[in-house]
Image (spheres, grey):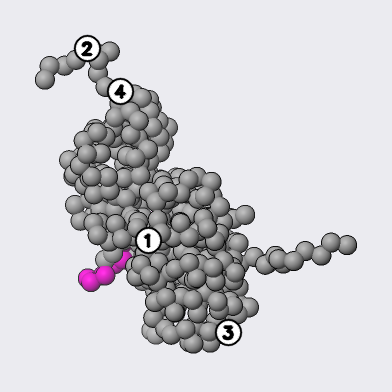
Amino acid sequence: MKITDACVYPYPVGDSSIRRFALEARSFGYDSIVAADTPAAEVCGITVIPGIFLAGIPAKDVQSRVKKCRGSGAVIAVQVGDNGFNRAVASTNGVHILRGIHAADKRAFDHVAAKIAADNNTALDIDLSPLIFGRGHLRQKAIHRYIDLMILYRRFEFPLTISSSARSVLGMRAVREATGLCSLFGMDETDVQAVLAGVSRVTGPTESVVKVIT
Amino acid sequence: MSIRPPTLREKRRYLLARIDPAGMPVETKDLYYAVYEAVVSLFGDMAAAAMQPSVLAIESGHAILRCRRGAEREFAIALSTLSTCRDCTLAVRVIAVSGTIESLRERIATLVPQEPDVPAHDGAGEGVPDADPCEYRFGTTPVEPVVWHGHKVDVIEKGFKNTRRLFLTTEDLEKIHATTIPDGL
């Protein structure tokens, strides 16, 4: 079980190199990070997982992009859209994470989409950046979405991940700080520990539902 | 109000927090306003009044903060949402919580090296490379190191336009020697 920050943006998108991110992640208590447009590597004892973040493209294009990226070992995350899009993407084999639920419409992710995500082992991402950098309505909306998400999570038990979406090491938060921030929408420490291992849950080998007993 | 006797005073807790990035000049008053804004925007005026957040001192890149006993967890959460202080991007990382300021000062003494102004280019210590004749490059960009902390190096891009601060490691930097002839010459 690896404690993973599900999204960071190293240089040149951000202002910190991937090595620096890895150093900071180690001091913050993480085992691995998912970094955008970065090759897989082991840096300073931290596993760097390449991340492909898709946004603003239709569901059909998502499928073709996922086919191209299959077998690369990258974590594929897709920005959420409307309800139909989310259901289609959640059922797409190869999509690991749905991101950006904090900015989505309140009807964008309902119980049907949650059931599909749970069946297909597709994770929903909890982005901490609107809680850290957002103020007023933006943060209130994000907390509201996450509270709704937690209700669905407790019912359907789909995977969750936590990401800082940090473009700088200053935007990263330690595991202890992430636990505190997640307590704002009703997550306890045990939940956070399980959710931080969400990336290894969605990228690891899938367990068969049916067990053959001989 | 007159000062109450010690048994009637409310109990307080003191937090030690590291200010990132290192070497950032932060005024106590500016940090107090930033902390107070973070607490009020997250928990509201009622909780802020009950929490009584305060910044007591900034010493060696560390801040000593104060709140009422029992509110330190909420205070730490609010501190983790602090990202700017007077238009400067920073992060406040809570290191320790204590009942006395003295113990936090002792903790700072263990955290801060004795001679912080000694440059350490081999990645062994901490400091500001003020008299370093070498020039460095990150990729193709010439950069100027401003803070070294072990393997961590904060640099500033050289140039007229893009002079943002970059957070790198010693492995990311490449020394430009005087004998190096750039490509294309």
Question: To which residue does mark 3 refer?
Answer: A67
Q: Position of residue A192 (x, y in %)?
A: 50, 50
Say whether mark 2 and mark 4 are on the same chain. Answer: yes
Q: Looking at the image, which is closer to me, B137 or B150?
A: B150
- Name, please, the residue furthest toward the left: B1
Mark 2 to mark 1 CA distance (whole Å): 48 Å
- Residue at (55, 76) in percent of width and height: A91
Residue A146 location (% of width, % of height): 40, 58
SS of the residue under disc 4: loop
Tell me the residue at 29%/29% (across/down).
B68
Residue B169 location, quadrant:
bottom left
Mark seen at residue B5: 2
Q: What residue is at 37 percent from the left and 38 percent from the top?
A: B73
Residues packed near mark 3 inside 10 Å, few (<14), some (14 to 19) or many (20 plus): few
What's drawn in magenta, residue-wise?
Answer: B153-162
Disc nearer the start of the sequence (4/2): 2
Examine the image and state in which quarter residue A128 appears. bottom left
Q: Is residue A160 above or below residue A66?
A: above
Q: Are marks 1 and 4 on the same chain?
A: no
Front of the two marks 2 and 1: 1
Q: Amino acid at mark 4?
A: Lys
**Looking at the image, is mark 3 or mark 1 earlier in the sequence?**
3
Marker disc for residue B17: none
Quadrant showing the N terminus of chain A: bottom right
| Disc 4 and disc 2 in contact, CB within 8 angstroms | no
Q: Tell me the residue that label 1 is attached to.
A: A145
Q: Amino acid at mark 3?
A: Lys
